[in-house]
Amino acid sequence: MSYSPLQTERYKYEPKLPEVLRGDIHKIGINPKGSTKSESDQKELSELFPRTYGAPFIETLAGQKGTESDSINIGVVLSGGQAPGGHNVISGLFDALKKANSKSNLIGFLRGPSGILENKTIELNSDIIDQFRNTGGFDIIGSGRTKLESTQQFDICEDVCKLHDISALIIVGGDDSNTNGAVLAEYFKQKNSGISVIGVPKTIDGDLKNEYIEVSFGFDTATKTYSELIGNIEKDANSAKKYWHFIKLMGRSASHIGLECALQTQPNIALISEEIEASHKSLTEIVLDMVNIIVKRSELGSDYGIVLIPEGLIEFIPEMKQLISELNTLLAEHEEHFGTLHTFEDQSRWINRELSRDSSYVFSTLPNNIQRQLLMDRDPHGNVQVSRIETEKLLIQMVSSRLDEMKSEGKFKGNFNPQHHFFGYEGRCAFPSNFDADYCYSLGYNAYVLASSDLTGYISSIHNLSEPVEKWTAGGVPVTMMMNMEQRHGKMKPVIKKAMVDLQGKPFTQFASKRDIWAIKSSYVFPGAIQYFGPAEVCDSTSITLGLEGKK
Ligand code: FBP
């Protein structure tokens, strides 16, 4: 095995823990604080989760326990898309477990939740763990998107956990995986199985956050990685002065990634899906706004610029939202028939017949490549896979044709040479920033404390993240208190509420107060590569979003 010099150095990095988790592990315990309730749908949720709803908020404290810890077996699974820091969650969990009792074991389920159902496991020892400390990726045990939701699956989970004598299952995942984890926790409790379920908040998208979870892990590193690349492109644009770069950024529905990258790099245009939805802007209006900026810059002699586009934009444009929703329903309800249509021509003919008049019109105005992408396979939740829709190309095509028209009318005299990019997978497995390395290690370490305290249906949480690590605090939040009831596949389901960009929040208002200047005058900022060694203000800084949201 050969390692890069950085990997070799990163192995030596010792993640920082908050003060409360630093002392004797045997004495770290929990302080339950009152009872909790969800913000809405309290009646429905308390009926669906009779054994776990209302559980107290937990504060992790030093000096709470004795000196003995029983040996236990804990299972861990990584669920969904990769996010930098997953390996540190596992190493923090492992270190705490072994410190508490060297006979305890950590069992990793391979390739995501399907590893539990298929009983594919690996016992994680220090030789394995040491190869993955402070590195990106989920390759230590792999990840997957299998959903755990049926009673039959829950029974298999119970059997497999019992086979390995596992008393706690740690699910590292996003809002859906943690929702399913909470349902599993309730089920285990109802069956008196003695297995607890603890979640860890993961996703680069940043949409798993609320009053109790300040940020999901991976967001910091992913946005710093994308911002480095955007800054490099800004330098290139500023040097060559000949291209407009349209950059789509991963992040699913929410625009947190796009907003953070905009704050870090100050591009000419950054679209925020939530704002577009709130102002009911049509695709044509979005294009015209962009064209105005391009023409204005051109008149000032700048035929170049940077546009940031959130991955999920297309779902927030009213007419596209309607079209996508009709397509999702049609494809779900007529899956079998659709499968018999083998050519794109047959598929689009059938689709056009079934769609409403308005949606059929919108569909027919879209370029062929976008039509095809809209008909591709859905994800396991039945949603269109936005990362596969080339919105950046769609916008380029529409902007180009409007500028051509304006040119022929004598209203545009410049040049428009577009380039398109999609930054997504590039950021999901980067070496975790010091912030993510410390945060994830603390989340994993704290997950052990919660699990060994026989808590279930909780998510490991670390607070005060905009402060230095010493001042961070730790605890557990009952998953049910973050839930509400939402319509999924035509049925009302309990789910963790997804956090979208708050248009009244500080990150967005700061961006909105500056963007008109950034649009016309090149005000680019070049964040450079993530630094792992050096002055704290360069290496240990958090994201701008977290900094602004953390400010009282
Ligand atoms: P999670 O929600 O599972 O954390 O995944 C995040 C994400 O990176 C999204 O930003 C993106 O839309 C999606 O995964 C891509 O999925 P896949 O890895 O299956 O291509």
Image (spheres, helix red, strand yellow):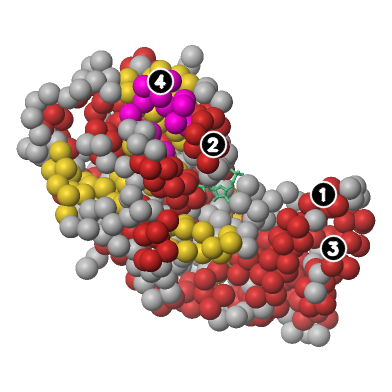
Q: Look at mark 4 in the image and give the residue it sits on.
A: 164
Asked if marks 2 and 4 touch (Cβ < 8 Å), the reply is no
Nearer to us: label 4 or label 3: 4
Gap in angstroms between the C-alphas marked 2 and 4: 17 Å
Query: Does 364 lie within the magenta span?
Result: no
First along the sequence among labels 4 and 3: 4
The image's mark for residue 300 is none
Viewer-nearest of discs 1 and 2: 2
- Per the image, the residue denoted by label 1 is 336
Q: Residues within 10 Å of mark 4 (few under 14, many from 20)?
A: some
Residue flagged by tag 3: what amino acid is it? Answer: Ile
Q: Residue under label 2, please give it.
A: 153
The amino acid at mark 4 is: His
**Ligand 1 has an atom within 8 Å of the beta carbon of the residue at disc 3:** no
Question: In the rendered structure, which disc, 4 or 1, sits on the residue that comes first in sequence?
Answer: 4
Q: Quadrant of the C terminus?
A: bottom left
In three-dimensional space, the C-alpha distance between marks 3 and 1, rounded to whole angstroms, equals 14 Å
